[in-house]
Amino acid sequence: MGTYLRVMTKGDIPAGLRLNELAGWNQTANDWLRFLEASPGGCFVVEENGNVRGTATTICYENRFAWIGMVLVDPECRKQGIGTKLLQRTIEYLDERKIPTMKLDATPLGQPLYRKLGFVTEHEVERWVLKRPRNAIANRPNSGKRTLTEVQLKPVLRFDREIFGADRSHLLNSLRRMSPGLAVGVWSDGALQGYSFGRSGLFADHLGPWIAKNQEAAEQLLQEFLENSSRETLIVDCLTANAMATELLHSSRFAPARRLTRMFRGPNENPGNRESQCAIVGPEFG
């Protein structure tokens, strides 16, 4: 049957899950479905003798820029050029669509390859992890004090476009639909001060995006996430330059786990507003 690269389909989701489990990543079938629904022609696999050996995904945001993620290779098939082939195909696909800018969050291991393909550094992201004892969270009710209503969601999505640099309402609506108790807003005198979303992953709940105009709002959103999540393990991918966020995570007993580098290829004309960004959705989504 041989080895070949093709477009990923929903039938490949179990294979994608297998690869991200082998890598210790937190994605679920719902995450893979988000990729395929957002970019049905822009997610790829390398198949060898009927078995998926590698994956890569893309998501376009308003045709302003695209995100490349989920570049995974079966551990048994590494150093065979599969990751390079998948990455080159995603770049080719996005170039064909005339997407001017491509972004990704790179591990230290992947950075040399990305640099060879024309990616340059934008800023740093650090993953923080909290592990809680089971008896500290058992049977905890969702407070629901600040969960977003349908009416409140509209100004959040408008503001998020400015913060992120492009519209990603499809993604945020999906996060809220799947984890409504983790979609939270903070308001003061009718003015939006911050918001956050979350998702339930394979082994942890993941906070992101976490957006706040000031420390008070940032702390309220983090505390709401801690109260509303019932998982033992929690993950936050925090912008390292945001001292407000890193201080709050440290005081809440999160610990830094790994460093990622935000990289881009092409003109970075829509960088968004990093000052209010405490945490990204995740390296696979931006």
Image (spheres, rainbow, N blue to C red):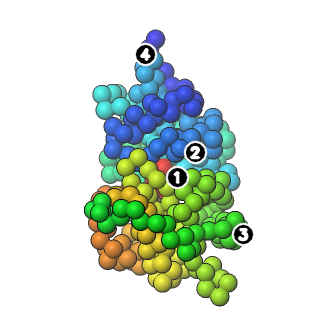
Residue type for callout 2: Arg
Residue type for callout 1: Phe
Q: Dot 2 lies on which element?
A: helix
Q: Do the residues under discs 1 and 2 have CB atoms within 8 angstroms? A: yes
Residue type for callout 3: Val
Q: Quadrant of residue 58?
A: top right
Of pointers 1 and 2, the one earlier in the residue sequence: 2
Q: Mark 2 points at which residue?
A: 34
Q: Dot 3 lies on which element?
A: helix
Q: How far is the residue under mark 3 from the one under mark 4?
A: 51 Å
Q: How far is the residue under mark 3 from the one under mark 1?
A: 25 Å
Q: How far is the residue under mark 1 from the one under mark 2?
A: 10 Å
Of pointers 3 and 4, the one earlier in the residue sequence: 4
206 and 76: which one is in front? 206
Q: In this view, does 273 lie to the left or right of 238?
A: right
Q: Quadrant of residue 188?
A: bottom right
Work out which residue is located at the far top of the displayed protein and give it.
1
Q: Going 50% across and 33% down the picture, which residue do you hit?
A: 13
Q: Mark 3 points at which residue?
A: 151
Q: Which of marks 4 and 2 is in front?
A: 2
Q: Residues within 10 Å of mark 4 (few under 14, many from 20)?
A: few
Q: How far is the residue under mark 4 from the one under mark 2?
A: 27 Å
Q: Name the residue under label 1.
A: 285
Q: Dot 4 lies on which element?
A: loop
Q: Is residue 35 above or below residue 50?
A: below
Q: Is residue 114 above or below residue 40?
A: below
The numbered mark at residue 49 is: 4
134 and 64: which one is in front? 134
Of pointers 3 and 1, the one earlier in the residue sequence: 3
Instruction: Locate residue 41, reporting x and y percent.
Output: 63, 34
The numbered mark at residue 218 is: none
